[in-house]
Structure formats: C-alpha cells, structure tokens
C-alpha cells in the first residue's frame, strides 16, 4: 500500500506525517514513543489500513523528520497534548481512534484527560499512567538480569558514563528481554532507535529506558484515570519493560476498559505477535465505529 506523506504546520513548526488507506470505517492516529523516537517503529500498524481505516503516523516535534526547535522548554507533556489536538484538526481527522505506544500511550492518556471528546477510542500499547510506578517495575526487572550485567550497569551508572560501549552492551541485554524479543529486530525499530532525538529523549526521559531522570520523572495521573470515559483498550506484553502491573492498574481504573497481555511479547507486540495484535485491535475498533 503506497502511503501519502508530507509536512503539516502545527503550532508554528513543520511536522512530518505519513498516511495509509482510506477512512471507510474511521481514522486511526498513531502516537510514537520515546519520547524522541520516530514513527517508523510503529509502521506495522499500517496493516490496519487494509481493513477500512486510514492510519496516520507523524513525527512529534523535535523527532525524526519533523522540525527540531532550539528551545528545550517546548519538550514537555503538556505541549505535546496540544500538538496532538492541533495536528488532529490540521489533518481533518475528526474524532480518531488514538493508538499510543509507550510514551505515546502516556501521551494518549494525557490527551484523553483533556480532549477525550475529540477521540472515538483510546488504545495504549505498553503505555503508562505513572512514571514512578513504571521505574520501580523496571528496577525490579534489572535486578533479575545476570549478576555480571548488573555489575556493569552499576559501575558505569555510578560514573555517569552512559555512552561507554560496555555499558551499552549491558543495556542491550535488558532491551532484548524487555523491549523487543525478536532476533533480528525489525529494521523499522533499529532505524527509530538509531535516529532518536537526543534533545527530546534527554530532556524528557534520560540516558536510557530504565534511567528516567528527565522532566517526566514524577508524572503520575493515577488518581485521574477514573475521569476517562472514552472506550479504552489496554495492551501490553508479558515481558514488557512497562510492566503488566502498570497495564492492569490502567485497566482497573478506567471503567469499562478492556485488557490484553500478549504472552510472547515484551514492549512491541505489534511486531512480536503481529497477526494476533492486529486481530485484537480490529475486534475492539469494530465495536466502536466512528
């Protein structure tokens, strides 16, 4: 399927987008993770376009092919929420089905808390509502790694040497277990990680997935989740770096939401169990037509 691609001016900056399919059954808007990754690792979700949906991807401000501002103060969750809504309006998406992965799932939740009237449904994939809880669970997973890997991590973390080749090698042990369990990784994932925006990732997250010391470190909307009434599907993987405990808590607090944990997946079930993932999402979307 040949995509349409281009740039849209949103809140004063040019954002790159890519669209697949026609909106016979509705619009799907995909929010990538990171923060600071690119949309490319989500591209398996273009499969949904074969079932009557137009699927729209875009690179968030400062990411991928989109414009990179010099002002780091723009890289905050609140502005990205406004960006989602401005992009939705600019692209004339109406009330889309919003699918967010990882930080994109956190962004979808933040968006729903302000703009749920502008959504048909919300799907989070390895999404999170509480960074402190997510970090505690990631630290638990780190403690289950081989002792030599833990020792290497501790050595270089204590020195603040997050770019040391030995440290990065140890980090990959965690990633291969809890980020993506496929071997080899999909090239779209490799591309997204190789092109991660250090200004965005460093400002909002930190040096890696489990060392969150950026401006999102205290973000927690646990007590607000019961305000979300849009139909919600919560997805995750059994080995997910954003622990199933996080997914279950989102599910328990959003009334009427649905939950599926993919047994052979970590953070990217849309690659790790691609066919099963698409069927699950399509079943959910089919119940909540635009």
Image (spheres, rainbow, N blue to C red):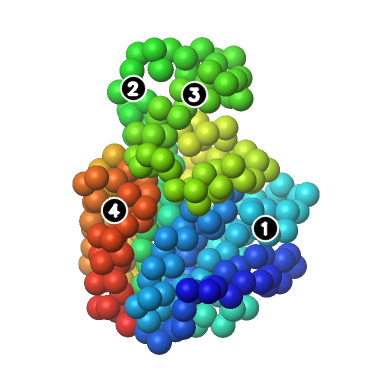
| Residue 153 on image: x %, y % | 47, 18
Q: What element carries label 3?
A: helix
Gap between marks 4 and 1 measured at Cα: 28 Å
With 282 as the anchor, is 164 left or right in this view?
right
Q: CB atoms at circles 1 and 2 under 8 Å apart?
A: no
Q: Which of 196 and 49 is in front in this view?
A: 49
Q: Residues within 10 Å of mark 4 (few under 14, many from 20)?
A: some
Q: How far apart are marks 4 and 2 (CA)?
A: 24 Å
Disc on res. 273: 4
Q: Do the residues labelled 1 and 3 touch (CB within 8 Å)?
A: no
Q: In which quarter of the image is residue 156?
A: top right
Whether residue 94 is visible to the viewer of this picture, yes or no, is yes
- Within 10 Å of the Cα at label 1, are there few (<14), some (14-19), or many (20+) other Cα atoms? some
Residue corresponding to mark 2:
145
Q: On screen, 115 above or below 144?
A: below
Sequence-first tag of 4 and 2: 2
Residue under label 3: 169
Task: State the SS at label 1.
Answer: loop
Q: How far apart are marks 1 and 3 (CA)?
A: 28 Å
Residue, x 29% and y 46% (percent of image)?
A: 265
Vertical comparison of 83 with 212: above or below = below
Q: Which of marks 2 and 3 is nearer the N terminus?
A: 2
Residue displayed at 41% across by 75% down: 49
Q: Where is residue 262 in the image (x, y as percent from the top left)?
A: 24, 51
| Disc 4 and disc 2 in contact, CB within 8 angstroms | no
């Amino acid at each position: 399927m040949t995509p349409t691609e281009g740039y849209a001016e949103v809140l004063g900056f040019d954002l790159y987008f890519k669209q697949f399919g026609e909106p016979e059954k509705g619009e799907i808007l995909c929010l990538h993770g990171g923060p600071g990754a690119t949309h490319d690792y989500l591209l398996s979700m273009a499969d949904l376009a074969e079932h009557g949906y137009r699927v729209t991807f875009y690179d968030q401000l400062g990411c991928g092919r989109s414009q990179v501002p010099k002002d780091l103060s723009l890289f905050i969750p609140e502005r990205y929420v406004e960006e989602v809504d401005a992009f939705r309006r600019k692209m004339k998406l109406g009330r889309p089905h919003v699918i967010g992965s990882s930080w994109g799932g956190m962004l979808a939740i933040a968006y729903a808390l302000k703009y749920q009237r502008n959504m048909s449904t919300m799907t989070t994939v390895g999404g999170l509502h509480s960074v402190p809880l997510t970090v505690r669970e990631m630290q638990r997973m780190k403690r289950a790694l081989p002792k030599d890997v833990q020792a290497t991590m501790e050595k270089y973390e204590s020195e603040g040497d997050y770019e040391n080749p030995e440290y990065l090698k140890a980090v990959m042990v965690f990633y291969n277990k809890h980020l993506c369990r496929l071997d080899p990784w999909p090239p779209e994932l490799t591309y997204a990680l190789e092109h991660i925006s250090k200004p965005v990732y460093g400002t909002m997250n930190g040096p890696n997935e489990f060392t969150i010391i950026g401006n999102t470190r205290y973000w927690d909307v646990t007590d607000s989740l019961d305000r979300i009434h849009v139909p919600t599907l919560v997805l995750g993987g059994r080995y997910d770096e954003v622990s199933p405990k996080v997914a279950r808590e989102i599910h328990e607090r959003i009334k009427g939401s649905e939950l599926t944990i993919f047994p052979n997946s970590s953070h990217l079930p849309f690659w790790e169990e691609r066919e099963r993932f698409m069927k699950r999402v399509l079943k959910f979307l089919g119940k909540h037509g635009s």
